[in-house]
Image (cartoon, rainbow, N blue to C red):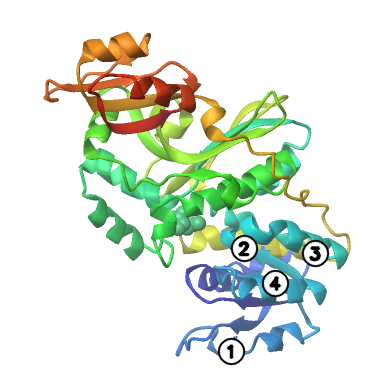
């Protein structure tokens, strides 16, 4: 079967590599080979093994009836949205690693795929090489999903791990992640949490059956994580992780948040370090399952794209029934009205904090200034917590970080 790759960067070149390197196992599984007919990119790649397949014209792919499979690894929504839609409408299967595109236009593109009897699959868009979307949709199909939370960004996990384990400065760790090909073109999307937000939206849309847009999920990145908070976490049995978190509420709505969390060391997620991703899913029948692996990088991400290409080829005639419903504006609860526990650090008088906050757990740190007070709250809404904190006389808050409970 003939395929095309759109975007010959970190992921696209990995897809080309795997299709060539593992052609034997792919052909064995599929009963036929997947041959690359075009590679679309505006750049030149002199001497590349796929140089003779390069084209700068999207229409070469769109108008070639021999091409049945397309891997979109361009990133961004322009022109990826337009290209993907036209390919699906032309009856071609499309696989993608593009989380921004899926988080924003997933519902619409899945609709286009359905209308034209083809598949639109994007396992690589969440967790890189970690199988998570197919397990959620297929293997856990007998469950109501109750909650999921996960480390969904390799770059920020790499940075936090370096800060935590090696006291490496933030900028140095980021530069290293960029050098290793983990970071987005503009790493702000990693650092400020937008990338995790997009992945959380995709997981939530599959888990809860309605399209969740990035603007519905409150998002906070790791840019404000202070080395003192890292020290408090270390001294008191916690890791600090950037999580995408989502759970079904009794009201039928969902609570979704992207934020740094204090994670107790006993939790599986606390063991996920460096570029690795980890996702815990809780289903009402299966209980807790844990997915772990490389969440970024050329080959792991391309591994998921190629598996999707194989799946599309296997389901060339009988389309997979995969998708979710339209956006429902009221489906995501205002996060500050949801219950949570928090780490708070500030300067003030511990007796005043005790009087206002009631039953909290105070944390200690060797060498901390005498007027520094740090504690972990009971479970309450963020709204209630903020009201109580505002009522402590002369207490200056330096940090407030969610705690995974
Ligand atoms: N920048 C992303 C990450 C790439 O670091 O996880 C994979 O989506």
Q: Read off the residue under disc 3.
A: 113
Residue drawn 74% across the image and 30% down it: 144
| Spatial CA span between label 3 and label 1 | 25 Å
Q: Read off the residue under disc 2.
A: 101
Q: From the viewer's perspective, is the residue at label 1 or at label 4 nearer?
A: 4
- Badge 4 marks a residue whose secondary structure is helix
Residue in front for this viewpoint, 329 or 6 = 329
| Spatial CA span between label 1 and label 4 | 16 Å
Whether residue 280 can be seen here: no
Would you identify the image quadrant in which residue 391 lies? top left
- Badge 2 marks a residue whose secondary structure is helix
Give the mark, 3 or 4, whose residue is nearer the N terminus.
Answer: 4
Residue in front for this viewpoint, 356 or 128 = 356
Give the mark, 2 or 1, whose residue is nearer the N terminus.
Answer: 1
| Spatial CA span between label 2 and label 1 | 21 Å
Q: Read off the residue under disc 4.
A: 84
């Amino acid at each position: 079967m003939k395929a095309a790759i759109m975007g010959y960067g970190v992921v696209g070149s990995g897809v080309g590599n795997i299709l060539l390197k593992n052609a034997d196992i792919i052909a064995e599984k599929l009963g036929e080979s997947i041959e690359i007919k075009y590679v679309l990119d505006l750049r030149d790649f002199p001497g590349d093994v796929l140089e003779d397949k390069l084209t700068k014209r999207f229409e070469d792919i769109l108008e070639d009836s021999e091409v049945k499979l397309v891997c979109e690894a361009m990133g961004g929504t322009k022109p990826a949205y337009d290209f993907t839609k036209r390919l699906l409408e032309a009856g071609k299967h499309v696989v993608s690693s593009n989380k921004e595109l899926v988080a924003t236009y997933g519902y619409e593109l899945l609709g286009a795929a359905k209308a034209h009897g083809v598949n639109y699959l994007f396992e690589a868009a969440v967790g890189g090489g970690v199988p998570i979307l197919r397990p959620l949709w297929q293997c856990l199909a007998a469950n109501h999903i109750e909650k999921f939370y996960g480390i969904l960004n390799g770059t920020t996990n790499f940075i936090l791990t370096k800060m935590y384990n090696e006291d490496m400065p933030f900028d140095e760790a980021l530069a290293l992640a960029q050098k290793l090909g983990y970071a987005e073109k503009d790493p702000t999307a990693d650092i400020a949490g937008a990338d995790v937000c997009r992945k959380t939206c995709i997981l939530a849309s599959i888990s809860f059956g309605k399209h969740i847009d990035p603007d519905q999920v409150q998002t906070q990145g790791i840019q404000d994580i202070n080395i003192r908070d890292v020290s408090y976490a270390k001294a008191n049995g916690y890791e600090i992780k950037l999580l995408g978190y989502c759970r079904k509420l009794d009201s039928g709505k969902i609570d979704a948040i992207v934020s740094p969390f204090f994670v107790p060391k006993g939790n599986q997620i606390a063991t996920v370090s460096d570029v690795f991703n980890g996702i815990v899913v809780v289903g009402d029948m299966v209980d807790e399952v844990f997915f772990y692996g490389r969440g970024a990088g050329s080959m792991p991400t391309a591994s998921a794209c190629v598996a999707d290409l194989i799946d599309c080829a296997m389901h060339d005639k009988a389309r997979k029934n995969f998708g979710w419903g339209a956006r429902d504006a009221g489906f995501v609860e205002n996060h500050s009205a949801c219950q949570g526990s928090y780490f708070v650090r500030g300067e003030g008088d511990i007796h005043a904090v005790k009087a206002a906050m009631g039953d909290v757990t105070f944390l200690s740190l060797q060498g901390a200034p005498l007027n520094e007070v740090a504690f972990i709250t009971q479970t309450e809404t963020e709204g209630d917590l903020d009201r109580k904190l505002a009522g402590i006389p002369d207490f200056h808050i330096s940090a407030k970080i969610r705690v995974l409970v």
